[in-house]
Image (cartoon, rainbow, N blue to C red):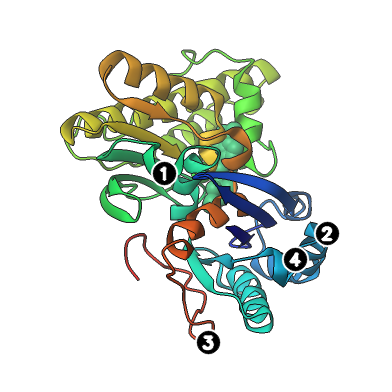
Amino acid sequence: MRILGIETSCDETSAALLHVSKGVARIEKHLTASQVLKHAEYGGVVPEVAARLHVETLPLLIDELGVSKKDLDGIAVTRGPGLITSLRVGTDFARALAYGWELPIVGVNHIEGHIAANWIDKKIASAYAFPALVLVVSGGHTELILMKGFGKYERIGSTLDDAAGEAFDKVAKMLDLGYPGGPAVSKRATLGDPEKFAFPRPLLGQPNFDFSFSGLKTAVLYTLQRKKEWSAEDVNDICASFQAAVVDTLVAKTIRAAKAKKAKTVFLAGGVAANGPLREALASAVKKELPKTEAVIPALQYCTDNAAMIAMAGYFRLSKKKSDPWKGMLADPAWELGLN
Ligand code: KG4
Ligand code: ZN
């Protein structure tokens, strides 16, 4: 089975060809055109600019991918959550293709796509044991999800304010490190001392599975206001100390939830999953505190937004002959995981 995946929920235009054979999904072709340089000029994503760039780029990517009706068994496209103007470019293009090529189409939840990234290159049917706990960390979401199987989700915790990626982006802005903030902050953090500044670990003392990052962001701001000029070394230390606070909080809450829910697998998913210290800390905490549980960390190239993960998520429905009517398959910017 071959599936064309399309992702345009935010500021990456991406298309991929997934081939499932002998129960294993491989990505045969994958093209992503990042808009970050364009948005960096404005210090963040400008929805109108993002949509226009998707309109210009998506047809070129599909053309370069070189796929046509005869190569495909279905189309999977991100339907939400995301920026409505960006989502509409991908969904409308995919709907037109499905209509013209007479192919089944499925609208994929973007968060489910991030989770599905963990199935690429694996034996799909027997890859993981359930129940599983998923830590979703992206620019718009920070959630703990209990998963009883693919497609069966229960959200048990989430951020009360900023998402983890958003906190990275805002701290980068305060420090003038540019956009997107996550890679910039983590790069500077490699040169700094994570214990130099004692930033708070928000909500760690509370028994729930929720997160809060706005207080941490404010703590960084107050620290910055203490002096007019900060040296490059200071900035490295602030980045390292901030990152350590985020990683500690994410890992501690995930381990606590995994223990409470007796998870057999712990998944990491979303753009912030590209963060090196988070990947290492989660893997080693699971190994140490839950030796019978498997920690699954997505391959680096499938962490930030991409169409391969969308094609992978689409496979789970298309392979069961489930699809959406192209006429009614409209973008849903606030689509919650687990709800239709
Ligand atoms: O999943 P994603 O690509 O887009 C959304 O769905 O939001 O996640 C983007 C987020 C941004 O906030 C970005 O700063 C963050 O992921 N990010 C990182 C790293 N790479 C991307 N955060 C920390 N460390 C990184 N290496
Ligand atoms: Zn994402």
How far apart marks 4 and 2 lie (CA) works out to 10 Å
Query: For this view, does 15 lie left or right of residue 291?
Result: right
Q: Is residue 174 visible?
A: no
Q: Is residue 33 visible?
A: yes
Residue to which mark 3 is pinned = 327
| Label number found at residue 136 | 1
Residue to which mark 4 is pinned = 58
- How far from the left and from the top, in percent, is residue 272? 52, 38
How far apart marks 4 and 1 lie (CA) works out to 27 Å
Q: Earlier in the sequence, mark 4 or mark 1?
A: 4
Nearer the camera: disc 1 or disc 2: 2
Is the C-beta separation of discs 4 and 2 under 8 Å? no
Q: Amino acid at mark 3?
A: Lys
Residue 234 lies in quadrant = top right
Q: Earlier in the sequence, mark 2 or mark 3?
A: 2
Instruction: Say if disc 3 is inside 8 Å of ligand 2.
Output: no
